[in-house]
Image (cartoon, helix red, strand yellow):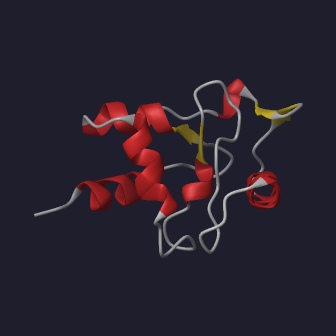
Amino acid sequence: MKTKEDNVYFLLTKIPNGKVTTYGSIAEKLGISAREVGRILSRNKHPEKFPCYKVVRSDGSLGGYTIRNRNDSSTLKVKRKKLIKDRVKFNEDKVDKSCIFYI
C-alpha cells in the first residue's frame, strides 16, 4: 500500500520540464493539506529522482527549499537556479503563471 509520501513523490515525476506545480495542487489531488505536502518535501532524501524544487506557492513565489536540513535564502537561490536551468520563466521573484502545471 502506498503512503502519502509515495504519492507526493510520484506526482513530482509528472511535472513536465519548464513547469512547476503548487503545494496546493498536490494537496488537493491527494486530499491532504498544503503544509503536509511541504513537510513531506522537506524530508525528500532523493531530490535527483523526485524534483521537489518544482513545487512553489500558489502565488508563484518559491516557498521553501530544504538542503541538508537547511531552509534559508541560500537554499532558495539554489531552487531558483534549478528552475531557471529547467527553463521555468520568472516575473521578478515569482514564477510566471504560464509555467504553473496543475496536477
Residue 33 position, x and y percent, is 35, 35
Q: Residue at x 47, y 48 (%)?
A: 38
Residue 98, visible in the rendered structure: yes
Q: Residue furthest right?
A: 92
The one nearer the camera, 46 or 68, is: 68
Q: Quadrant of the N terminus?
A: bottom left
The one nearer the camera, 10 or 33, is: 33
The one nearer the camera, 96 or 58, is: 58
The one nearer the camera, 22 or 13, is: 22
Q: Residue furthest left?
A: 1
| 54 shown above or below 3 | above
Q: Quadrant of the C terminus?
A: top left
Q: Residue at x 27, y 40 (%)?
A: 30
Residue 32 position, x and y percent, is 29, 37
Q: Quadrant of residue 60?
A: top right
Q: Quadrant of residue 28?
A: top left
Q: Residue at x 75, y 44 (%)?
A: 88
Q: Residue at x 76, y 53 (%)?
A: 76
Residue 103, visible in the rendered structure: no
**Numbered label tally:** 0
| 90 shown above or below 42 | above
Residue 75 position, x and y percent, is 75, 60
Q: Is residue 2 left or right of residue 13?
A: left
Q: Is residue 48 left or right of residue 73?
A: left
Q: Is residue 6 left or right of residue 40?
A: left
| 49 shown above or below 38 | below
